[in-house]
Image (tube, helix red, strand yellow):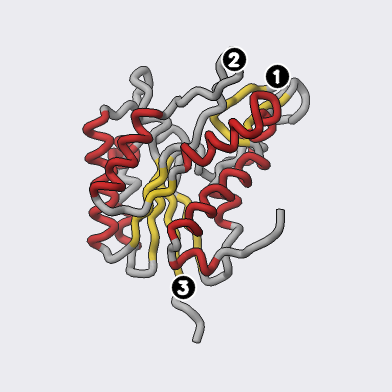
Amino acid sequence: MPSAPITVHLIGDSTAAEKEPDARPETGWGTPFAERFEDSVTVKNHARNGRSTRTFLEEDRWQPVVRDLTETHYVFIQFGHNDEVPSKEQYTPPDAFVANLEKFVDETRDCGANPVLLTPIARRHFDEAGELEDTHREYSELTRTVAQEHNVPLIDADERSRSLLRELGPDESKSLFLHLSPDEHPNYPDGVTDDTHFSEEGARRMADLVLEGVDDLELELAAHVVRYDR
């Protein structure tokens, strides 16, 4: 007997979001993530550029997700990139960030669905000694604390991605991010150096890390991942 259809909702910021054609080859990890499941799984990517937990709620982007939730649904929750920067208008103070994560978790569970928290994926910031900086320390730890205190499955995308970046080092890791020379791509005639957003290869590698987290958590969802050799 075939299993019941599953829906995975992604909520978060630009690192996970679908990209418009004029932004390519920038790619959010949610795009290759969605391609890695059997036909019985639908991935709905609600992540949007520039959003924090606060602005995602203020813009009423959460309520349509809640209205759609049932027992066979998952909600993957990844914020922090914009919440944590005081100079951004999207800034969310730590206490409010925690309260917003708790709201996502509680309302997901109220619908019988399954919340999964993710720490924000690392930025590619190496210091002069070639050591990777921990740019998300506070807000990643807040996410871990919410997961622990509320018994929510956690994919520590920050730690997993920092491990990958340290392994690759300052030079090789550039290929995972949006680094383009002038005239290399028509969307970026002047070139671009972006150590937050991903290339197509980088998005695939980050999606792989999230899927490894799904496996490690032994979520029922893991049984529906399409496996292949890299």
> Does label 1 or label 2 sit earlier along the sequence?
2
Image position, residue 158 (x, y; %): 47, 37
| Snapshot quadrant of residue 153 | bottom left
Q: In this orientation, which residue lies closer to the viewer: 220 or 52? A: 220
Q: In this orientation, which residue lies closer to the viewer: 96 or 222? A: 222
> Does label 3 or label 2 sit earlier along the sequence?
3
Residue type at mark 1? Asp
Q: CA distance from mark 3 to mark 1?
A: 45 Å
Q: CA distance from mark 3 to mark 2?
A: 49 Å
- Secondary structure of the residue carrying tag 2 is loop
| Snapshot quadrant of residue 135 | top left
Residue drawn at (23%, 34%) of the image: 96
102 is higher (above) or lower (below) than 227: above
Q: Which residue is mark 3?
A: 5
Residue type at mark 2? Ala
Image position, residue 36 (x, y; %): 60, 59
Q: Nearer the viewer, mark 3 or mark 2?
A: 2
Q: In this orientation, which residue lies closer to the viewer: 226 or 7? A: 226
Callout 1 environment at 10 Å: few (<14), some (14 to 19), or many (20+)? few
- Secondary structure of the residue carrying tag 3 is loop
Callout 2 environment at 10 Å: few (<14), some (14 to 19), or many (20+)? few
89 is higher (above) or lower (below) than 208: above
Q: Nearer the viewer, mark 1 or mark 2?
A: 2
Kindly give the residue lying farthest to the right in the view shown.
Answer: 183
Q: Which residue is mark 1?
A: 190
Residue drawn at (55%, 36%) of the image: 163
> Does label 3 or label 1 sit earlier along the sequence?
3
Kindly give the residue lying farthest to the top in the view shown.
Answer: 128
- Describe residue 96's horizontal placement relative to residue 183 as left or right: left
Q: Which residue is mark 2?
A: 129
224 is higher (above) or lower (below) than 168: below
